[in-house]
Amino acid sequence: MAVTTAAPAAGPGQNQSARAALAAFVGTTIEWYDFFIYGTAAALVFGPLFFTTESPYIATLSAFGTFAVGFLARPLGGLIFGHLGDRFGRKRALVATLVMMGIATSCIGLLPTYASVGLWAPVMLVVLRLIQGLAVGGEWGGAVLMAAEHAPAGRNTFFASFAQLGSPAGQILSLLAFRLAGLLDKESFLTWGWRVPFLVSILLLGVGLAIRLGVAESPAFEKARAAGGPPPAPVREVLTTCLKPVLLAAGANTFAIASVYLFNTFMIAFTTQYLGIARATILDALLIAAVVQLVMTPVGARIAELIRNERLFLQGTLVWAMLAPYPLFWLVETKSVPLIVLGLALNVVGSATFYAVIAGYLAGAFPTRVRYTAISIAYQFCGALAGGLTPIVGTVLAERFQGHWWPIAVFGTALAGVSFLCVTAIGGYRARQRGFLDG
């Protein structure tokens, strides 16, 4: 079932389609840049700066613990902004999430460290991370829907992928920011250099707002509101009428979310602490992999659109994803830069093409009137578990099985396997509920 759209084939509506896609791309890029620089900083500097411990292992776990806090806040953000988006419009909710994220991220760049204020440092860090989590919790669902619901007829999968482009683009910007900051000597980097990527966020906020404010409200939302008015309690309606697809959608998102934090955030800590690979080397390799993801995302969306069988396409990408971790970690263990890049690139082909299509596929499982709330609940509750806990699980496995990468690879396979089962199941649900989903 495709996402309902109302944009005409040409003229002003077509311009709004392009503008909505651009706004989804730029907005999610900024939001994910803000979210990802926290993960990179957690892997590189937050441990020694914000926590007092003689054990690098415990410091890293503590830093990743604050990283996970953002994921725990994401479901609440999804509930709040899903409600607002289904009641009052996608656009208002998205402007609010962008402002919250930009301000919180900039404030992180101004925080004093543990050496200056003691326990207040990690407390303030956690509070700002909570605000980040609330913001990104409301961002994804709205950005996907604004792009998909503005799309020309039959193009919703491709247009929804522009929101998904924000993830690799944000990753590229975050890696570049820390790569440039890393050119400083160690003392300067730890003193002030790590702060610059966070402070840049306030400039990006201005750019994002200028673009996002120029997009009209979703035509599908306007049509649904005119037909029957907004739902008085979207969350209650979702839980009473759409609980099964919400659970399946959460499971389907497992690999889309967890892969980012297993093969990016955790990979930084794993390679620098357990394999002795230089920080600059792994950041450069991840940067190239993010470029591959950026290219493969629209390519994957277009292929799925052409073959007209999204479920089969997603299943194929997940088979690739279940196999890819083994050559990835084997190549990373060689410590050869070209081979590390090759392993990351091979792995990201599966994750990028899956991520490109999964948003539009899952949006089609819910009726327009509660779609924002439904996909936000599914995505963000999954994110709280699959995203927030993945770096911690990876760190525990690396410490427990030092010298062996296969347990981490098996963990990656299991994550893709969960998504495979749920993608298969939700396809059957969509086929049985066509009439209901048109509403």
Image: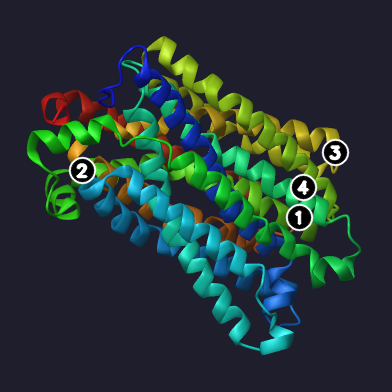
Going from N to C along the chain, the mark reached first, 3 or 4, is: 4
Residue type at mark 4 is Leu
Instruction: Identify the residue position indicated by label 3 in the image.
Output: 337
At 16% from the left and 27% from the top, the residue drawn is: 438
Instruction: Identify the residue position indicated by label 2 in the image.
Output: 370
At 66% from the left and 64% from the top, the residue drawn is: 42
At 36% from the left and 35% from the top, the residue drawn is: 146
Mark 3 vs mark 4, foreground winner is 4
Residue type at mark 3 is Val
Does dot 2 land on a helix, a strand or a loop? helix
Residue type at mark 2 is Val
Q: Residue furthest left?
A: 228
- Is residue 432 toward the left or the right of residue 190 in the image? left
Mark 4 vs mark 1, foreground winner is 4
Where's the N terminus, which quadrant? top left
Residue 392: in sight, yes or no?
yes
* Category of crowding for the residue at label 4, using alpha-carbon neighbours closer than 10 angstroms: few (below 14), some (14–19), many (at least 20): many
State how far apart marks 1 and 3 are (Cα): 19 Å
State how far apart marks 4 and 2 are (Cα): 40 Å
Does dot 1 land on a helix, a strand or a loop? loop
Counting from the top left corner in percent of width and height, residue 315 is at 43, 26
Q: Quadrant of residue 7?
A: top left
Going from N to C along the chain, the mark reached first, 4 or 1, is: 4
Please state the total of marks drawn on the protein image. 4
Residue 261: in sight, yes or no?
no
Instruction: Identify the residue position indicated by label 1 in the image.
Output: 403
Q: Nearest the camera: 262 or 13?
A: 13
State how far apart marks 1 and 2 are (Cα): 48 Å
Going from N to C along the chain, the mark reached first, 1 or 2, is: 2
Going from N to C along the chain, the mark reached first, 1 or 3, is: 3
